[in-house]
Image (cartoon, grey):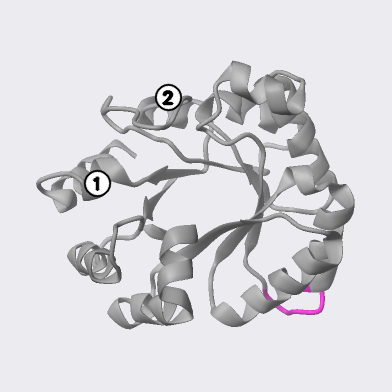
Amino acid sequence: MELCVALDLPTKEENLNLIRMIKDYDVWLKVGLRSYIRDGENFLKDIKKINPDFKIFLDLKLYDIPNTMADAAESIMGLNVDMFNVHASAGKTAMCEVMKRLQKYDTRPIVLAVTALTSFSEDEFSEVYEKSISEKADQFAKDAYDSGLDGVVCSAFESESIKSVTSKQFMTLTPGIRPFGEDAGDQKRVADVAFAKNSLVDFIVVGRPIYNAKNPEEVLKRILETL
């Protein structure tokens, strides 16, 4: 299981300060909507200047018509990132089109599909998708697997079931991790590191418990020791 640190701080400089603090650790870095919209491609380049070995997960959750998603995926190829994601609810045609477009490249990033956002409660999710989270997450995961993607974004509670209906090698990445029982904030389906590990999760994403800590480096070290 690998650790991915979320770069969701209010300013680019705060994110860069955090990166400098943890530059010697073997972790992934997640660049989400706010940071990418605000700071753009230059921010990705700044990360690599601090440590060229950092692996970047570009968390933009592509969701559009198939051709537009494929165009966007191809544009991402020029950003030198190591992983990005799409929404599984865009459908199998869209996911297949994305993967087809990437076939012409010798190497490509890991591509994941978002199943159910970890901010959803069971009731909120059923209002939108008219099925339970577990049932729909399995379905979305099978669609992504059949479409040739590498894995999915899900909560730790869905990870084992998803691997059972796809493959043990099909990756699961789980946001909303509260390593040592910290406050859940706006997340609903949160888990600690031990639960994620037992659920066969491949990547855990941790943000606020690290960057809001008095000593972010110390928290990161504790998480890595647990892993």
| Residue at 44% in and 60% down | 34
Measured as percent of width and height from the top left, residue 42 is found at: 42, 82
Q: Alpha-carbon neighbours of circle 1 within 10 Å: few (<14), some, or many (≥20)?
A: many
Q: Name the residue under label 2.
A: 195
Q: Which of marks 2 and 1 is in front?
A: 1
Q: Quadrant of residue 191?
A: top left
Q: Of all residues shown, which one is farthest toward the right?
A: 93
Q: Does the magenta stretch include residue 52?
A: no
**Would you say 7 lies left or right of 67 here?**
left
| Residue at 75% in and 79% down | 105
Per the image, label 2 sits on a secondary structure element best described as helix
**Would you say 159 lies left or right of 178 here?**
right
Q: Which amino acid does label 1 sit on?
A: Ile
| Residue at 54% in and 67% down | 82
Per the image, label 1 sits on a secondary structure element best described as helix
Q: Distance between the residues labelled 2 and 1?
A: 18 Å
Q: In which quarter of the image is the N terminus?
A: top left
Question: Which region shows up in magenta?
Answer: 102-107
Q: Mark 1 points at which residue?
A: 210
Measured as percent of width and height from the top left, residue 139 is found at: 79, 31
* Residue 164 shows in this picture: no
State the residue in front, 107 or 68. 68
| Residue at 42% in and 24% down | 195
Measured as percent of width and height from the top left, residue 186 is found at: 40, 32
